[in-house]
């Protein structure tokens, strides 16, 4: 901590060129060590190499490339108007680093959710402590071993461990904490942060609904749902959690979901090379317990020794069934029937605001009503989980699903302080009157910019 704070206070990591160098080093680690990370992700979660690259390693590389391409632009000072009484003064805002940032990552995307926030914090000129999840031990120890080979200990430190180590870490004073995980621990993190008045970003989860109505292409809805729901065996914060649909559509949708699962994972998903396993025995037992919450349309097979649970669709699920009481976070998709859009909206609104709200409906009024009458971290129509792959969109929840957001430009803003600057024109001795008008005096902001860019070089 002392080293990280001293490096921050020295201004060493403030220049844009330095920040970019950090990002390139982080990128190099992901490129050079990609195969090792893919192996670790397989060891922790049974992720196949294609999925490991697509959703973790390459995703993080793309995020870094995107930040590198735009960072200069995002860091430009933003001028604002100055009231007349300040004469020729100028005013602007400037993003400045916060200091030492703590990133606490969960187990389900253990590389992605450590490295993407890390990239944002470095791009904003901070020094960073990364605390990977102890429930993904292979990825955690690989990060701890490899990161110091690419980034100096005065830039990034990795602290491994579980609740005890995290509790000890949280006693330190950080300048920002980004926590990804469940809402119960989020409250502990926020309380610890409050002792130091440290701002927090909380990336949480919840039950993300998918409304499918009779005005949709049901086959397309089913195949798009299956394409995203069972990635990482459903262990994703943005995964579709449950499907409210009208009585008329339910049987068609159940049938289409079963066909889509079969075509994506064959009749024996245990053999599908890219299909992940459940992270540990506790979660396996929890999920197996939820399988009895409805009629099994497809799936339901499970095996404790490999922690395999087949992609499963449940029908005739009651609103008070166990599977509807908690975020599923696994490969189970319950279908519930509602009378109409009114009932769907009141059902969604009777529960905590979700991270994602997804809808399949070609009816413009249904889309407008969902937009106007509900709230969620993000909402998509016809493209579940797509909010995650649009680089310009902020990623985050609202209410119980989170606080604040990040990704791309939004990471740089989250991990920076937007500093207000007001500056009178510099007055130069001897420049008042006489020949002063012949001297090309830079504006206050240009002066500042010149100093900054000199610093950057
Ligand atoms: P987890 O158990 O790995 O915990 C997350 C982090 O909190 C870990 O680093 C862990 O060491 C730490 N931790 C655990 N207990 C602690 C304690 N008592 N005190 C201090 N730190 C502690 O992950 P999880 O919470 O099971 O993650 C799953 C949840 O995360 C789901 O609700 C999911 O929706 C959510 N999630 C959200 C996002 C997002 O981006 N919004 C992404 C992934 C997961």
Image (cartoon, rainbow, N blue to C red):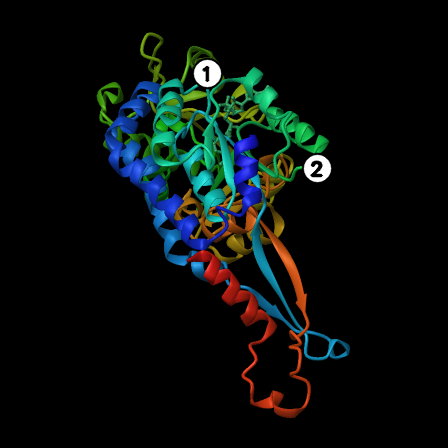
Q: Position of residue 354 (x, y in %)?
A: 56, 38
The front one of 28 and 2 is 2
Residue tagged 1: 283
Q: Where is residue 18 in the image (x, y as percent from the top left)?
A: 42, 49
- The vertical placement of 37 against 396, above or below, is above
Can residue 170 be seen? yes
Can residue 230 be seen? no
Residue tagged 2: 197
Left or right: residue 173 compared with residue 278: right
Residue visible at 55% across and 18% down?
Answer: 165
Going by the picture, which residue comes out furthest to the top?
Answer: 305
Label 2 near ligand 1 (CB < 8 Å) = no
Kindly indicate the quadrant of the structure image that contains residue 288: top left
The front one of 395 and 30 is 30
- The vertical placement of 137 against 64, above or below, is above
Quadrant of the snapshot with the C terminus = bottom left
Q: Where is residue 282 in the image (x, y as percent from the top left)?
A: 47, 12
Quadrant of the snapshot with the N terminus = top right
The front one of 77 and 239 is 77
In the structure shown, which secondary structural element does the residue marked by tag 2 occupy? loop
């Amino acid at each position: 901590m002392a080293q990280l704070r001293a490096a921050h206070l020295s201004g060493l990591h403030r220049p844009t060129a330095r920040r970019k160098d950090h990002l390139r080093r982080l990128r190099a680690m992901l490129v050079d060590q990609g195969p090792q990370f893919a192996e670790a992700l397989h060891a922790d979660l049974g992720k196949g190499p294609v999925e490991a690259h697509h959703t973790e390693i390459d995703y993080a590389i793309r995020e870094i490339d995107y930040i590198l391409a735009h960072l200069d632009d995002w860091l430009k000072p933003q001028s604002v108007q100055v009231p007349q009484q300040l004469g020729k003064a100028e005013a602007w805002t400037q993003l400045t680093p916060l200091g030492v940032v703590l990133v606490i990552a969960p187990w389900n995307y253990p590389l992605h959710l450590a490295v993407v926030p890390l990239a944002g914090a470095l791009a904003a000129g901070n020094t960073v402590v990364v605390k990977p999840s102890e429930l993904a031990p292979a990825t955690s120890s690989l990060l701890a071993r490899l990161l110091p080979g690419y980034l100096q200990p005065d830039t990034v430190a990795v602290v491994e461990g579980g609740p005890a180590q995290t509790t000890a870490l949280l006693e330190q004073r950080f300048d920002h904490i980004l926590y990804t995980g469940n809402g119960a621990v989020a409250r502990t993190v926020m309380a610890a942060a409050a002792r130091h008045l440290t701002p927090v970003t909380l990336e949480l989860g919840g039950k993300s609904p998918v409304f499918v109505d009779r005005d949709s292409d049901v086959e397309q809805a089913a195949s798009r749902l299956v394409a995203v729901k069972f990635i990482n065996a459903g262990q994703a914060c943005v995964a579709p959690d449950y499907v409210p649909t009208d009585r008329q559509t339910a049987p068609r949708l159940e049938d289409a979901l079963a066909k889509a699962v079969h075509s994506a994972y064959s009749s024996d998903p245990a053999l599908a090379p890219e299909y992940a396993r459940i992270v540990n025995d506790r979660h396996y037992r929890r999920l197996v317990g939820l399988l009895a919450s409805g009629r099994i349309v497809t799936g339901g097979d499970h095996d404790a020794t490999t922690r395999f649970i087949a992609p499963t669709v449940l029908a005739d699920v009651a609103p008070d069934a166990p599977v509807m009481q908690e975020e599923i976070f696994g490969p189970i998709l319950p279908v519930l029937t509602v009378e109409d859009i009114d009932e769907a909206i009141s059902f969604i609104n009777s529960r905590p605001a979700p991270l994602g709200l997804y809808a399949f409906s070609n009816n413009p009024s249904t889309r407008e009503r969902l937009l106007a009458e509900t709230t969620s971290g993000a909402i998509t129509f016809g493209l579940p989980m797509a909010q995650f792959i649009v680089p310009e969109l902020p990623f985050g929840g609202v209410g119980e699903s989170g606080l604040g957001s990040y990704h791309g430009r939004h990471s740089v803003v989250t991990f920076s302080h937007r500093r207000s600057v007001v500056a009178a024109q510099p007055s130069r001795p001897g420049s008042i009157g006489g020949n002063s008008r012949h001297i090309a005096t830079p504006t206050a902001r240009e002066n500042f910019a010149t100093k900054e860019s000199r610093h950057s070089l």
